[in-house]
Amino acid sequence: MAGERWTIYWNEYAADTYLYGSEITFHKKDDVEFFNCLMPPGTVIKQWYSKTNYQMQRIEPALPMIDGESHYQIILNIDCPEDEECMVRLVFYDRYEVEVGSIAIRERMTDFQCPLKTYSYKLQLINGGVTKFRFHSIVICEIAGEGNNIWDRKGN
C-alpha cells in the first residue's frame, strides 16, 4: 500500500549546482543533460532542500516534508553511461539544524526511513565517477505500514 508521491525536477536556477567546467542543457522539465569531464568523484553536483531561508538563498523548498515515523522509497530516474554512476545522499537535520543522520544511495530504487528527530533534510546528487548523464527526476514515495524506526534502535 502506497501513500503520497512527490517528483523532484532539476530546475534551471543555477544555485546549488556545480558549474565549474560543467555543460548543462535543459531540454525539458524532465530532461536535463549534464557533462563535465574534469569533476572529481564525490563532488556534489546539485542540491535540493525541504526547508530554505528565502532571504538568504533565494530559492523555495523543492522537497516534501517527511517524518521519522513513515517509510519511504526513492527512485532515481537518471541515465548514466555503463560503468559510471550518480548517487544521492540524504542528509537529515533536527530543528536546530544539527545533522542527525545521512543515507547514501547508489541503487535506482531504495527504501529508507529518516531519523525520528528529523525536522528538515537535503538531497544531494553526487558524482560517483560519471562524466555525463541525463537527469529526468527523483521520485519520493511514502510506503504505508513498515514497522519500527531503524534510527530509534541505533539510539538517535
Image (tube, rainbow, N blue to C red):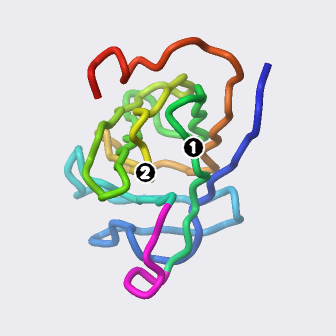
Q: Is residue 119 above or below residue 79?
A: below
Q: On the rendered structure, is 141 left or right of 71?
A: right
**The N terminus lies in which quarter of the figure?**
top right
Q: Is residue 55 above or below residue 132?
A: below
Secondary structure of residue under mark 1: loop
The Cα–Cα distance between marks 2 and 1, rounded to whole angstroms, is 9 Å
Residue 42 position, x and y percent, is: 23, 45
Q: On the rendered structure, is 108 left or right of 132?
A: right
Q: Nearer the viewer, residue 36 or 46?
A: 46
Task: Name the residue carrying label 2.
Answer: 121
Q: Is residue 55 above or below residue 11?
A: below
Q: On the rendered structure, is 140 left or right of 51?
A: right
User: The magenta stretch spans which residues?
Assistant: 51-58
Task: Name the residue carrying label 1.
Answer: 66
Q: Nearer the viewer, residue 92 or 132?
A: 92
Q: What is the quadrant of residue 115 in the picture? A: top left
Residue 104 position, x and y percent, is: 35, 33
Magenta residue check for 42: no
Q: Are marks 2 and 1 in contact (CB under 8 Å)?
A: yes
Amino acid type assigned to the residue bearing label 1 in the image:
Ile
Secondary structure of residue under mark 2: strand
At a point 41% along the width and 17% down the height, the residue shown is 150
Residue 145: mark in rendering = none
Q: On the rendered structure, is 2 left or right of 61?
A: right
